[in-house]
Image (spheres, rainbow, N blue to C red):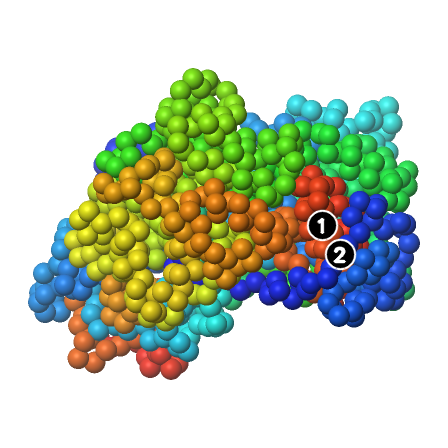
């Protein structure tokens, strides 16, 4: 089961050598100018490397890939209604679990978003509850006129225009206005003015303009690559950086035509990155990328690991986030550091589990020297990831190897051959798991795949299935020698610190981190267009030279972000 | 016509403990019984993974005089309401290539060879699953035409959620099980009621009118915006619109108000840990039984965990290895313990349904056909042959229960059983189900 993989685009094609993008130069110089659908300067230069050149990545792109139409994630929905209408946390809004597909761990994966009847019903129930609660408790947040003084019809018109534009993140057109006015009238006829307002709120929250992030920037003439208009820009920025709808300042900027130039956009990005919500976004990226939620549900065999508990698992999840937070916001933010940082973070719960004394209820940094022999090498030695990629009672070099291969190197591993006997090994008495695994995959059919995974995982044998450090296994000294093959940093290594050093210099790992950011930011895999290719190049270079925050600053400057492709069969 | 359900027995009080109420007490015989009407038929699909261990699965004896094997001992009280089979194959699960869990499951649910065989992850059914087809015929009478539910722990399917889906409208539209208890509760008891409607008639009429107005308007907006997007996104919007139309039909129809007392809503943070699965299952099974008892739905797709059971370990039985690994290891003892546990859960459902008096005065269990199915046959070999199908409950007399049908001398396809199930539940006279190649007709003698 574990080895079956969804096929992803062949990254090697996208990573044709020779791409050197323009980083930190402000991106396109005039965001508002039309590309006119011409090749412009964006066509591949056709040089020896076959990829875009620095020149070809500046200016309007000749082509970008079609964007994927994203429905709001559950978190985006809650954040958006909260920003729009106020606190809804007491309303018992439950949504069906969201789907991810293997190899694409992010929740905004458009292709995996299903909308079954249960979700539609829940949207309906949520909309009705939120509308009733708003009218009962916070009406002044959305209603700025007095229906008695202004007259009901006039006040309704004002309300629909202002509330509708905020909720749809764009001024209403005549059709939308008419639709919402009709609904107000239905509600009004059933009760009073406020019944009409409640009906409009309930309706708006079920409309496609609210639930989906349509890109509506108008194409001019036969244009196929369309620069985002101010409203699409505001929405893109806010969901990318804040996971929610635009705030008043973004709407005001859009209204005033202050989202047209690279400088305008950069100013907004800088403002937005200073908000705590942007920090949460960066942490959420790592949370989804590394699948940290899996740590929370870890349970270990209590006979083997009596000290492991849900509290320990929770603390292990926080450990990774604290480490990432420190590296990105207080360190250099480099991918290399994610793999090599010689320290970690602990609270008292985790300190007790890891055997590190003097910890308090607050997470604080603990350096390598204080870890009592436990190595520290960034996320590679995080107990939670080691526990989440293990069995209940024993380690799994296979799972740990797959994690490195798939999540950190973005490799796709081939499925087992049909009818393969993938019976797991039963260790003989006094045999280490490593020895059992080696015997197990001696069969050439098994070995063809396992030699890609297990030798990487062997490097983590110093950590038991609960994520604790150990020096012996079945009475023998732990052998944590490992081997990584088929990678740009292929070779043997001893333990996670040496593996971390290798990954830190890996171009593949750097490209993988870039790929994961691209998926997270755009809700799809990158395509073959020059726009996407340039975006990857620019993001990669920013990440390499400036770290993750530099990459985040470049994201809104890429062609993938700034333009939309008129879709096949669409407008 | 009134749809009438009442309780006939003093009900156990223990079942609802997990969510705070003995809620089967909720049924009040408040409506006039239409004793002459024919009772409705119901379907419960009951999926568990990883096949069986034949030496502890198949009964011994003759068609009508047989002894249950170890894995079915908990079902002994209901032996007269079971049909067990041997000699049933799922050959579509090997067409066009060996399909493993995914291809076998896709073939089993749709009765057709699976599509996109290039990878286990892309394998899809060739058509809708049987619950969808049955729901199209008999689901419309209730607020929820089809209830997809079960117990699906976080991370089931090893990170690929498509492996934790049991119901398919077609190759592109997958209907995931609703397994988080509070979400399941909210789906069943919309606005805290079984009908989703206020008690006050005028308020209910107003709400129906408003909902219709809003959903119709929303559909118009969808239609307008649909023109803007590309082909793949159009398909996704079409699926969304189809779901709106289904929900609209259900929330705007005038439903018979049920006197169905609602249990306490489970907490949003209900524990979904592996070790809590027995409690979690109890909560969801109780909700499912209540949904049938209150006539909120007549078609249920119950899904245990994931194809291959995902990463679930039966730690509450003392196991430390996953169900999937135990199957591969041919772990006879543990595999039999697991299937015995599933039998215990099934017996619990049968007992719950048996406590409801159906229209016409009989037991609801006798009008509820439960199909226990499994994507694999022999678990250790991961084969799709010797599919361990079991029928339980009854089809309102249309099937003679209490039998062991051994087809080993002339094996049949699982589709032939599905055809019979479909026909008896929907009153159809179809002559094939799914792919004709794998369904020469109804199961002989069934």
- Please report the residue visible at 30 percent of the width from the left and 55 percent of the height from the top: A437
Q: Nearer the viewer, residue A546 or B191?
A: A546
Where residue B145 sits: x, y (%)?
Answer: 46, 55
* Chain letter of disc 2 in the image: A
Are the residues at dot 2 and dot 1 in contact (C-beta closer than 8 Å)? yes
Q: Nearer the viewer, residue B288 or B364?
A: B288
- Please report the residue visible at 43 percent of the width from the left and 60 percent of the height from the top: A452
Where residue B49 sits: x, y (%)?
Answer: 31, 58
Q: Give above or below for A483 relative to A163.
A: below
Determine whether the residue tagged by mark 1 lies in a helix, strand or loop. helix
- The reply, left or right, for residue A285 in relation to residue B32 is right
Mark seen at residue A216: none
- Circle 2: is it few (<14), some (14-19), or many (20+) Cα within 10 Å? some
- The reply, left or right, for residue A297 in relation to residue A334 is left
* Chain letter of disc 1 in the image: A
In primary-sequence order, the first of circles 2 and 1 is 2
- The reply, left or right, for residue A302 in relation to residue A194 is left
Disc 2 and disc 1: Cα gap in Å?
8 Å
Q: Give above or below for A508 relative to A356.
A: below
- Circle 1: is it few (<14), some (14-19), or many (20+) Cα within 10 Å? many
Where residue B314 sits: x, y (%)?
Answer: 27, 46
Residue A74: image quadrant is top right
Q: Nearer the viewer, residue A483 or A212?
A: A483
Q: Nearer the viewer, residue B117 or B198?
A: B117
Residue A370: image quadrant is top left
Q: Give above or below for A166 relative to A423.
A: above
Where residue A114 sits: x, y (%)?
Answer: 56, 54
Q: What residue sits right under mark 1 in the picture?
A: A541
Q: Same chain for marks 2 and 1?
A: yes
**Res. B56 in view:** yes
Q: What residue sits right under mark 2 in the picture?
A: A20
Residue A221: image quadrant is bottom right
């Amino acid at each position: 089961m574990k080895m079956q993989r969804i096929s992803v685009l062949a990254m090697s094609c996208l990573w044709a050598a020779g791409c050197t993008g323009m980083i930190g130069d402000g991106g396109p110089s005039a965001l508002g100018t039309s590309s006119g659908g011409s090749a412009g300067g964006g066509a591949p230069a056709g040089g020896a490397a076959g990829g875009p050149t620095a020149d070809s990545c500046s200016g309007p792109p000749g082509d970008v890939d079609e964007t994927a139409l994203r429905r709001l994630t559950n978190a985006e929905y809650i954040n958006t209604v909260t920003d729009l209408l106020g606190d809804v946390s007491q309303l018992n809004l439950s949504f069906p679990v969201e789907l991810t597909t293997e190899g694409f761990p992010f929740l905004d994966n458009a292709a995996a978003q299903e909308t079954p009847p249960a979700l539609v019903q829940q949207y309906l129930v949520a909309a009705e509850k939120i509308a009733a609660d708003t009218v009962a408790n916070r009406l002044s947040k959305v209603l700025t006129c007095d229906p008695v003084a202004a007259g009901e019809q006039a006040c309704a018109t004002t309300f629909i225009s202002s509330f509708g534009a905020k909720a749809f993140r764009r001024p209403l057109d005549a059709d939308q206005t008419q639709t919402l006015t009709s609904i107000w009238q239905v509600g009004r006829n059933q009760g009073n003015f406020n019944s009409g307002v409640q009906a409009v709120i309930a309706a708006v929250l079920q409309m496609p303009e609210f639930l989906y992030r349509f890109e509506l920037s108008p194409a001019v003439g036969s244009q196929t690559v369309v620069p985002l208009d101010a409203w699409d820009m505001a929405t893109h920025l806010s969901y990318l950086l804040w996971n929610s709808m635009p705030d008043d300042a973004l709407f005001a900027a859009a209204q005033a035509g202050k989202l047209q130039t690279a400088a305008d956009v950069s100013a907004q990005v800088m403002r937005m990155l200073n908000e705590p919500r942007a920090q949460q976004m960066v942490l959420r990226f790592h949370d989804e990328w590394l699948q940290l939620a899996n740590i929370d549900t870890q349970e270990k065999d209590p006979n083997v690991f009596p000290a492991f508990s849900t509290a320990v698992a929770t603390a292990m999840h926080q450990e990774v986030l604290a480490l990432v937070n420190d590296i990105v916001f207080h360190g250099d933010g480099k991918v290399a550091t994610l793999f090599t940082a010689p320290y970690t973070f602990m609270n008292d719960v985790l300190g007790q589990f890891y055997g590190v004394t003097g910890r308090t209820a607050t997470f604080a940094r603990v350096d390598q020297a204080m870890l009592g022999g436990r190595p520290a090498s960034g996320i590679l030695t995080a107990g939670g990831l080691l526990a989440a990629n293990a069995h209940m009672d024993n380690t799994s070099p296979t799972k740990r190897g797959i994690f490195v291969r798939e999540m950190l190197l973005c490799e796709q591993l081939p499925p087992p051959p049909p009818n393969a006997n993938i019976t797991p090994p039963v260790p003989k008495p006094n045999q280490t798991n490593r020895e059992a695994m080696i015997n197990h995959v001696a069969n050439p059919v098994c070995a063809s795949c396992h030699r890609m995974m297990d030798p990487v995982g062997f490097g983590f044998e110093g950590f038991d299935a609960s994520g604790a450090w150990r020096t012996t296994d079945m009475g023998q000294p732990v052998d944590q020698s490992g081997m990584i093959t088929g990678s740009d940093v292929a070779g043997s290594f001893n333990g996670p610190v040496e593996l971390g050093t290798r990954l830190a210099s890996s171009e593949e790992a750097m490209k993988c981190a870039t790929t994961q950011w691209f998926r997270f930011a755009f809700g799809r895999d990158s395509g073959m267009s020059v726009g996407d290719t340039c975006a990857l190049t620019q993001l990669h270079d920013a990440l390499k030279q400036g770290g993750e925050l530099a990459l985040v600053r470049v994201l809104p400057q890429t062609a993938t972000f700034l333009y939309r492709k008129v879709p096949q069969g669409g407008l | 016509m009134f749809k009438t359900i009442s309780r006939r027995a003093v009900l156990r009080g223990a079942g609802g403990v997990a969510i705070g109420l003995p809620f089967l007490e909720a049924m009040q015989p408040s409506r006039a019984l239409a004793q002459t009407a024919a009772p409705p038929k119901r379907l419960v699909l009951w999926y568990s993974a990883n096949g069986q261990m034949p030496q502890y699965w198949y009964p011994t004896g003759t068609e009508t005089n047989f002894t249950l094997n170890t894995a079915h001992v908990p079902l002994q009280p209901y032996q007269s309401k079971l049909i067990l089979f041997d000699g049933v194959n799922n050959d579509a699960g090997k067409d066009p290539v060996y399909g493993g869990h995914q291809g076998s499951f896709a073939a089993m649910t749709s009765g057709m060879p699976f599509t996109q065989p290039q990878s286990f992850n892309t394998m899809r059914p060739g058509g809708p699953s049987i619950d969808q087809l049955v729901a199209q015929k008999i689901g419309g009478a209730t607020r929820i035409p089809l209830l997809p539910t079960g117990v699906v722990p976080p991370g089931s399917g090893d990170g690929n959620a498509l492996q934790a889906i049991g119901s398919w409208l077609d190759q592109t539209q997958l209907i995931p099980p609703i397994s988080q208890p509070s979400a399941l509760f909210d789906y069943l008891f919309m606005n805290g009621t079984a009908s989703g409607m206020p008690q006050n008639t005028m308020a209910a009429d107003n709400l129906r009118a408003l909902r219709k107005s809003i959903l119709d308007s929303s559909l118009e907006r969808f239609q307008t915006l649909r023109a803007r997007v590309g082909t793949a996104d159009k398909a996704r919007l079409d699926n969304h619109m189809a779901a709106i139309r289904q929900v609209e039909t259900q929330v705007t129809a005038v439903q018979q108000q049920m006197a169905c007392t609602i249990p306490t809503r489970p907490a949003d943070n209900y524990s979904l840990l592996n070790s809590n699965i027995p409690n979690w299952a109890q909560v969801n099974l109780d909700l499912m039984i209540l949904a049938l008892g209150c006539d909120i739905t007549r078609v249920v797709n119950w899904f245990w965990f994931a194809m291959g059971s995902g990463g679930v370990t039966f730690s509450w039985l003392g196991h430390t290895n996953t169900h999937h690994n135990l199957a591969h290891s041919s772990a006879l003892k543990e595999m039999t313990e697991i299937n015995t546990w599933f039998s215990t859960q099934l017996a619990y459902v049968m007992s719950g349904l048996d406590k409801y008096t159906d229209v016409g005065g009989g037991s609801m269990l006798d009008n509820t056909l439960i199909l226990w199915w499994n994507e694999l046959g022999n678990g250790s070999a991961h084969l799709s042959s010797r599919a361990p199908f079991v029928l339980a409950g009854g089809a309102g007399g249309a099937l003679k229960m209490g039998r062991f049908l051994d087809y080993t001398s002339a094996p049949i396809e699982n589709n032939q059983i599905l055809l019979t199930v479909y026909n008896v539940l929907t009153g159809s006279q179809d002559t094939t189900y799914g792919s004709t190649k794998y369904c020469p007709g109804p199961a002989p003698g069934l």
